[in-house]
Image (tube, grey):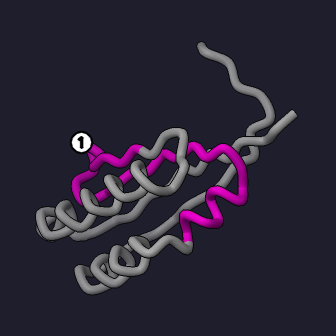
């Protein structure tokens, strides 16, 4: 049985800097969805915690995730996010051997 990889993560910025983050985030998400072979790649600001960006990602395998992390559009995103000022970062990957709709 093949193993997919789910990634859940957060980035935190000062709420007043979110408007500066969003254009860079849009470029990242669009490029990832178009080029990186993800099954799902979703990002949103938490409506109850301004400045907190939540990521949920689903990859067909670890190799796809690894390629994504080295893709050409990742470094410009990282540079922009650092320049804007990341306050917190946390991502965790999970191996998924079975899925079901609930």
Query: In the image shown, does 1 or 51 lie closer to the viewer?
Result: 1
SS state under label 1: loop
Provide residue 95's location: percent of width, then percent of height.
Answer: 75, 46
Question: Which quadrant would the N terminus be assigned to in this image?
Answer: top right
Provide residue 8's location: percent of width, then percent of height.
Answer: 54, 50
| Rendered view: 4 above or below 78 | above
Question: Which quadrant would the C terminus be assigned to in this image?
Answer: top right
Image quarter for residue 47? Answer: top left
Tell me: 60 left or right of 97.
left
| Rendered view: 49 above or below 101 | below
| Rendered view: 1 above or below 46 | above
Tell me: 71 left or right of 4.
left
Tell me: 3 left or right of 42.
right
Provide residue 28's location: percent of width, then percent of height.
Answer: 34, 62
Q: Mark 1 points at which residue?
A: 47
Segment colored magenta? 42-69
| Rendered view: 60 above or below 75 | above
Q: Which residue lies furthest to the front in this view?
A: 35
Magenta region includes residue 52 = yes
Question: Residue sitting at 27 percent across and 62 percent down?
Answer: 27
């Amino acid at each position: 049985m093949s193993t997919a990889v789910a990634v859940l993560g957060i980035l935190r910025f000062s709420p007043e800097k979110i408007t500066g983050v969003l254009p860079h985030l849009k470029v990242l998400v669009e490029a990832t969805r178009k080029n990186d072979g993800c099954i799902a790649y979703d990002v949103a600001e938490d409506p109850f915690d301004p400045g907190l960006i939540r990521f949920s990602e689903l990859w067909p395998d670890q190799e796809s995730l690894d390629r994504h992390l080295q893709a050409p559009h990742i470094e410009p995103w990282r540079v922009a996010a650092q320049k804007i000022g990341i306050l917190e970062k946390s991502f965790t990957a999970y191996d998924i051997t079975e899925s079901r709709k609930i």
